[in-house]
Image (tube, rainbow, N blue to C red):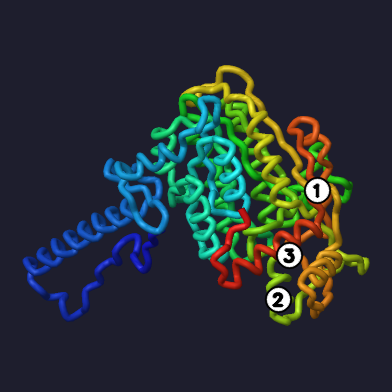
Amino acid sequence: MSHLDNIPSTPGKHKPDKAFRFHSAAASSSLSKLTLYSTLFLSVLLIFLLLLSSPSSPPSPRRHLSTGSHHTPLSLSHKLIRKSARPRYTTGHTVLVTGAAGFVGTHVSLALKRRGDGVLGLDNFNHYYDPTLKRARQKILEKAGVFIVEGDINDKGLLQQLLDAVFFTHVMHLAAQAGVRYAMQNPGSYVHSNIAGFVNLLEVSKLANPQPAIIWASSSSVYGLNSKVPFSEKDRTDQPASLYAATKKAGEEIAHTYNHIYGLSITGLRFFTVYGPWGRPDMAYFFFTKDIMKGKTITVYESPDKGSVARDFTYIDDIVKGCLGALDTAKKSTGSGGKKREPAQLRIFNLGNTSPVPVSRLVSILEKILKVKAKKKVVPLPRNGDVEFTHANITLAMTELGYKPTTDLEAGLKKFVRWYLSFYSGSKKKSSW
């Protein structure tokens, strides 16, 4: 995004020096004209720069879609987009996956493509964590026939072009600014992506004809300071412990609004601590593995009562099954061109493993798999947005989506470590797929 620096909103008043008080009237007139012309010129220049940097300006008819590491004109990438989005069978879905180069996005995109659905990815490849990992995921997707358009969900013109080019039956919205602690460093990025970006996607989707059904990633973080366990979809979610959680809760309320007014079919999925191969480096299981192997000290948090912090760790393959189950059971949106015809489906589900594991146990399992004793520093849980525990009640997802997690933490971590050692050892076989 462009920014204007050090440009005054209005030019300063001209204050003549005393030595010029007795200049002729003609000189004063010339000076006034010069000031006027300078003011006009600066005003025109300022307006031009503002228009140039405005993110809401309408797209040019010559707009280019950013595709991967290079830029391909829409006319050239159009064939790639259509090919990627074309389902193998006439009964298949056509799905736009946002955040397709992300951890969950990559796994979901591959699963959809492999079963015959048409899949088009969208990702901005930001630098929240090492984009090299995202590019590696992109290569895996390209080999599977999934094309990723490089762009931002806040780019309304780009989204409009994509929905004009392809009639998507579903949007799997997984793009988001993740991470609880990072919100204290860069709060604006969470509002920009998780709220503004989501609204932008819904704005474009509501005008589509036909409207796609929306499945999107909420978070277990919305339960915040809730002390009732296990967490149920019926529990209160009005006490977020972090800005990240607050933006996800806001997303759920925004989803309700667009469902109510415009007839968009929307399903929210509250993910519980997803882990596995090709995961996010900012997650504890990932950087614990890295630091234990390097002999570095890891920090383990404990609750105020000296107990271990616990998480409902959920393996990525189980999450993918839940995502596909939500997509397959999503009913069609009931609006058209921004107008609602009748009530539309609105759902929210927990996707967890329903078996919380203390973080101290996570460390013990990693020590066993890596055959390395971890150097640990146990400290009190800081007030940085983290909560003491998470525990999912998955009864609703089991009943309506057929969701049934099958991977325990030790089995899942073995698969993760196997991938990690392969990927970071320089081995050519970097894919676990």
Mark linked to residue 291: 2
Q: Is residue 68 left or right of residue 310?
A: left
Report the residue at 57% width, 63% height from top: 429
Image position, residue 193 (x, y; %): 55, 51
Q: Give the spatial CA distance, label 1 vs label 3.
A: 16 Å
Quadrant of res 383 = bottom right
Q: Earlier in the sequence, mark 1 or mark 2?
A: 2
Say what amino acid the circle numbered 3 marks: Tyr
Where residue 431 sits in the image (x, y, percent)? 59, 58
In the foreground, 308 or 426:
426
**Structural crowding at the residue carrying mark 2, measured as other residues with C-alpha within 10 Å and reported as few (<14), some (14–19) or many (≥20):** some
Disc nearer the start of the sequence (2/3): 3
Image vertical order of residue 63 relative to residue 356, above or below: above
> What amino acid is labelled 1 in the image?
Asn
Q: Label 1, on which residue?
A: 353
Position of 34 compared to 103: left or right? left
Q: Secondary structure at mark 3?
A: helix
Q: Residue at x 56, y 43 (%)?
A: 198
> SS class of the residue under badge 2?
helix
Q: Which numbered disc, 1 or 3, marks the residue that appears first in the sequence?
A: 3
Residue 325, position in %: x, y? 69, 35
Badge 3 crowding class, 10 Å Cα cut-off, few under 14, some 14 to 19, many 20 or more, is many
Distance from the alpha carbon under mark 2 to that under mark 3? 10 Å
